[in-house]
Image (tube, rainbow, N blue to C red):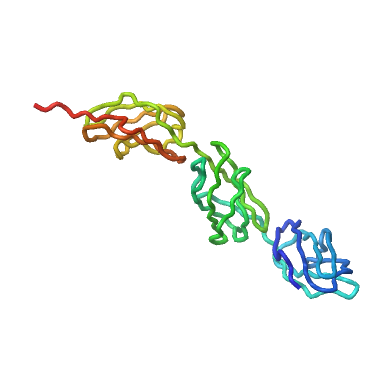
Amino acid sequence: MPISPNQGSTGGGTLVTVTGTNLAGTSAVKFGSKSATSITQVSPTQVTAVSPSGSGTVGVTVTTPGGTSNPLSYFYVGAPFKSSLETTSGALAGGNTISINGTGLSTATSVSFGAVTATPTVNSDSQLSVTVPAGAAAGSVSVSVTTAGGTNNGLTYTYVDTPTIGALNPTSGPTSGGTAVTITGTNLNSTDSVTFDGTPAPFSVINATTLSAVTPPGTAGAVDVIVTNPGGSDTAVGAFTYVAGPGI
């Protein structure tokens, strides 16, 4: 006589179906010593009941006028605990895979990012991997994990728009570097890096539309400037020109 599912929350409330024979006259379904909170469906081959609260492993029995069945094992599972996200921000388009660490994650069936749900891969009881779904808008959303034991919140993931570069001022400077350049654009407040011709430049964020960067040494000629944040990168092609000093 099988039972499905064979596990559920310690708080009870799990809809459980027991399949067997001669079940039409079912008068009680017990989880250990506790009666089911309700019996919602009875037929000659199937009984559906709602689990009471409990803990550990208990035997589920069905009672009819003909007697009481043999017990079937049912496992109570505690709610998951999440301790950290491997990555806490990313592109609005989603698509990146992150890890969620915690305990009680082995029965995870879904991970929600705000109102959007994704299906995780269970690596172990202490870790999940999940591909981040696309976000509705830039900003922070709560992350919740649902397992047989329930749902737990408490972590936050931030969707970030890709930066855009509008203009540089000035647009040229010596090959020795050291030129202070103001970069204007959009979504610059979460900038991770600024490069000139692939070389990282020191920078500071002024606000969402303005950065200040100092050019590293470079080779004479026009070079690309790239601004990167967790949402992606934008390239201003040939936006800054290194000028060689005079020779005598």
Q: Is residue 248 above or below residue 91?
A: above
Horizontal arrangement in the rendering, residue 19 relative to residue 189 (left or right): right
Q: Is residue 245 above or below residue 131?
A: above
Tell which residue pokes out farthest to the right in this image. 65
Quick one: quadrant of the N terminus? bottom right
Horizontal arrangement in the rendering, residue 18 relative to residue 115 (left or right): right
Tell which residue pokes out farthest to the left in this image. 248
Image position, residue 149 (x, y; %)? 67, 57
Q: At x 25% / y 27%, what residue is drawn?
A: 173
Image position, residue 216 (x, y; %)? 27, 34
Asked where in the image residue 186 lies, by quadrant, the reply is top left
Image position, residue 140 (x, y; %)? 56, 39
Quick one: quadrant of the C terminus? top left
Horizontal arrangement in the rendering, residue 164 relative to residue 30 (left or right): left
Asked where in the image residue 116 lies, by quadrant, the reply is top right
Image position, residue 196 (x, y; %)? 30, 35
- Count of labels shown? 0
Q: Is residue 16 above or below residue 216?
A: below
Asked where in the image residue 14 lies, by quadrant, the reply is bottom right
Horizontal arrangement in the rendering, residue 60 relative to residue 207 (left or right): right
Tell which residue pokes out farthest to the top in this image. 170
Q: At x 54% / y 53%, what residue is drawn?
A: 130
